[in-house]
Image: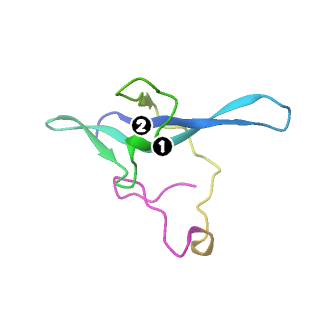
Amino acid sequence: MGKKYDLVVKTGEYTDGQGQTKGRFKNVGVMMEGDNGPYLLLDRTFNPAGVGGNEGRESIIVSLYEPKDNVGHQQAPAAKSGGYKARDLDGDDVPF
C-alpha cells in the first residue's frame, strides 16, 4: 500500500477553558494509493451539506493530513461505543 491521508473538514468552532477560539474538525475518510492510482474512502454517514462556514459558496474544503501517530492511544470499550466495535474505513481496527 502506498501513501495514506486523512480527509478532514472543519465543522465549527468552540471556546476552550482559557477563552481561546478553537476549530472543531471531523475525519470524514481517507485517501489511499492503489495499483490503479489514488482513491477515496468516505464515511458513508458524512453529509457535506451539513458543513457550515462556507456561506455563499457551493463547495467545501476537505483537507488532507498524514495520519497522526496514535501510539499510546487505546480503543474505547464496546460499552462506550454503543456496542459496536469501531472500525477504520479500510477495515482495520481504529487505534483509539
Q: Please report contact status of discs 1 and 2: CB closer than 8 Å, yes or no.
A: yes
The residue at which mark 1 appears reads as 27
Asked if residue 95 lies in the magenta stretch, the reply is: yes
Amino acid at circle 2: Leu
User: Where does the image place residue 94, in percent across and percent down from the top left?
Assistant: 49, 56
Looking at the image, the residue that sits furthest to the top is: 56
What colour scheme governs how the chains and residues are painted in the rendered image of this protein?
rainbow
Quadrant the N terminus occupies? top left
| Numbered label attached to residue 68 | none
Gap in angstroms between the C-alphas marked 1 and 2: 6 Å
Q: Nearer the viewer, residue 25 or 78?
A: 25
Q: Secondary structure at mark 1?
A: strand
Residue displayed at 60% across by 46% down:
71
User: Where does the image place residue 72, in percent across and percent down from the top left?
Assistant: 65, 50
Q: Magenta part of the protein: which range? A: 81-96
Amino acid at circle 1: Asn
77 is higher (above) or lower (below) than 19? below
Looking at the image, the residue that sits furthest to the right is: 18
53 is higher (above) or lower (below) than 88? above
Asked if residue 91 lies in the magenta stretch, the reply is: yes
Quadrant the C terminus occupies? bottom right
Residue displayed at 42% across by 27% down:
61
2 is higher (above) or lower (below) than 71? above
Looking at the image, the residue that sits furthest to the front is: 56
31 is higher (above) or lower (below) than 76? above
The residue at which mark 2 appears reads as 7
Q: Secondary structure at mark 2?
A: strand
Quarter of image, res 87: bottom left
